[in-house]
Image (spheres, helix red, strand yellow):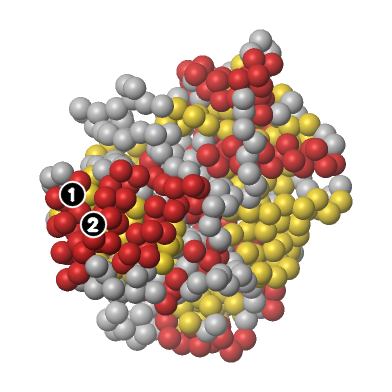
Amino acid sequence: MEILVCVKRVPDTAENEIEVNRDGSDIERDDLVYSVNEWDNYAVEEAIQIVDKVGGAVTVVSFGDEDSEEVVRREMAMGANNGILVSDDGFEGSDGKGIATILKSVVEKGNYDLILTGAQADDGAGQIGGMLAAMMDVPFASVVNFIEVVNDSQLKVGREIEGGNQEMNEIALPCVLSIQTGINEPRYVGIRGIRKVASVDIPVWGASDLGIDVSSVGESGAAVKRVDYFVPELGDGAEILEGSSEEIAAKLIDLLKAKGGIK
Amino acid sequence: MAAQVFAYIVHKNGVADDTALELVSAARNIVPDASPIAIVTGSGAELDAVCNDLSASFAEVWKFDHEALAYPNAEAIRKLLLAVLPTDAVILVPHDTFGMDLSPGLAVKLDSVFVSDAAGFEGMDGSTLKVIRQEYSGQVSTHLTADISAGAVINVRPGVFPPDESKSAGGQVVDKSTEIGDLSVGRQFLEVVEAEAGDVDITKEDILVSIGRGIEDQDNIEIAEELAKAVGGVVSCSRPIVDAKWLEKARQVGTSGQTVKPKVYLALGISGSFQHLGGIKGNPYIVAVNKNPKAPIFQVADVGVVDDLLDFVPVLTEKIQEGK
């Protein structure tokens, strides 16, 4: 099975406090720790496991600036066979449809049976997989937490739905799936794995390689535009306890006792 | 604006989801005098019950009754909506696992703009809608503009807009079932596998000591268990803990886990995503311990401690034990 996995380089929200920059045009990007989007990493692991079982190859593609090459390389160290970086100044400012349009042109240059994305990334939109499937006119399933290959033309997939329940479906190949975290246990990538792929050539494809008219994507083609970042004015929020750990603990115990938080 | 606003209704067992009446408010936040049309798909008596209830809140309720719609397969419903909706429609859908399935592709097929997980609207300027969203797990917000002149599919975050309880629409149910065409799609629904019950039922507990990513290591869960023992509660968790297989799924609080209604909720190292908060009902007293002062959990907590839980919680536990 030929599998394409779309991955994104994102600020790691577990490692960073995300703050808005001075004029609200962006987040403060100095000193941010970046990594591969967590959902995408599960998708790559799933693709590798499928190929281990039924054969084929895993190709990882990332859309972004030149720094995104590091996440492609990391996922190749994990076991993906091929990597592609899609990058062009004219792609900047693309909205979800713009990105899906560009990825569709990547898909068309290969011969893929299955395309995986993460269920969401740093902007929380969770839109690229569904858009890509619609543009390709193939079936789609979101928040997938189980995949079983039935045969060459069909998968059994589980979707994580509300209440911890799982919705089971049969889906025809080729198709697009967006992957939920927890579907597997992504393997550890050691320094040895990274070294192995350190000198592998990763092709960079731009608009002309993909036959894309940049006026249809990028900022000029975007119907959805981000105006600014801000931190909302909130109500009172939490009363933050101050003092030494012992002082805070004593105050908190009084509050908990009053609220029935200590039996 | 001439475009009609539609609200897609999620329902189960003959009852509309809470989001149904929230979408009425959301529609009026886009267009002040909007009279949204409810779209309800399903089958049989349960569908009729939902439609009849909704006619109190929507001027028009479009009913689509078909065996193949008995379970909401987004692939089939997308096909149906493409056939029956005007292309310049503004369609509101709850941003849940169904909306995530349906909407991005629907917007592509209708050639409409798509807005995901809208958490607020700041009105129209010509054909441009100003939207508020959150990014980076809720740590920052953004304003977006979306040109909705060619139609829009907008996924609306559940629980943000107040439900319109006025029940003053005096509306009618319009049976549109004859307009249903071919519903065959490449994805077939098989079954729903119910979540396994755990060794404790966190939905029945008054005191929950809930842990998130800040616990850092499986071995540290002991720290939370000792606090739970000291206060007489049980340990629950957020999604990353279950993803890591450190605790069973039945311990997970959130829209994709359990809905809990404790009296006191201690959130330790939990950032507070809306999916997690969506599983906490009944307005409990929330204590947040997080080393990141920007964590969204501090916006909803009653009291907060900005500290690493691994440093603070053992001190708290010891002090509680001393006092007993």
The chain under label 2 reads: B
Q: Which mark is residue A159?
A: none
Which corner quadrant holds the C terminus of chain B? bottom left
**Does residue B264 lie above or below B165 as drawn?**
above
Lateral position of residue A187 relative to residue B55, left or right: right
Horizontal and vertical percent position of residue A240 = 16, 50
Q: Quadrant of residue B89?
A: bottom left
Instruction: Provide the residue designation for mark 2.
Output: B319
Q: Tell me whether circle 1 and circle 2 mark residues in contact (CB < 8 Å).
A: yes
Residue plotted at (38% across, 78% down): B58
Q: Mark 1: which secondary structure?
A: helix
The one nearer the camera, B160 or A131, is B160
Q: Which mark is residue A246?
A: 1
Residue plotted at (63% across, 44% down): A185
Residue plotted at (65% across, 47% down): A184
Lateral position of residue B185 relative to residue A120, left or right: right
The kind of residue on which mark 1 rests is Glu
Residue plotted at (34% across, 53% down): B268
Horizontal and vertical percent position of residue A128 = 55, 42
**Is residue B95 visible in this depiction of the protein?**
yes
**Does residue B64 lie above or below A39 as drawn?**
below
The one nearer the camera, B303 or B184, is B303
Spatial CA distance of label 1 from label 2 is: 8 Å
The chain under label 1 reads: A
Circles 1 and 2 on the same chain: no
Q: Mark 2: which secondary structure?
A: helix
Horizontal and vertical percent position of residue B62 = 50, 76
Residue at the far top in the pictured view:
A199
Horizontal and vertical percent position of residue B245 = 57, 52
Crowdedness near tag 1: few (<14), some (14–19) or many (≥20) residues, C-alpha within 10 Å: some
The kind of residue on which mark 2 rests is Lys
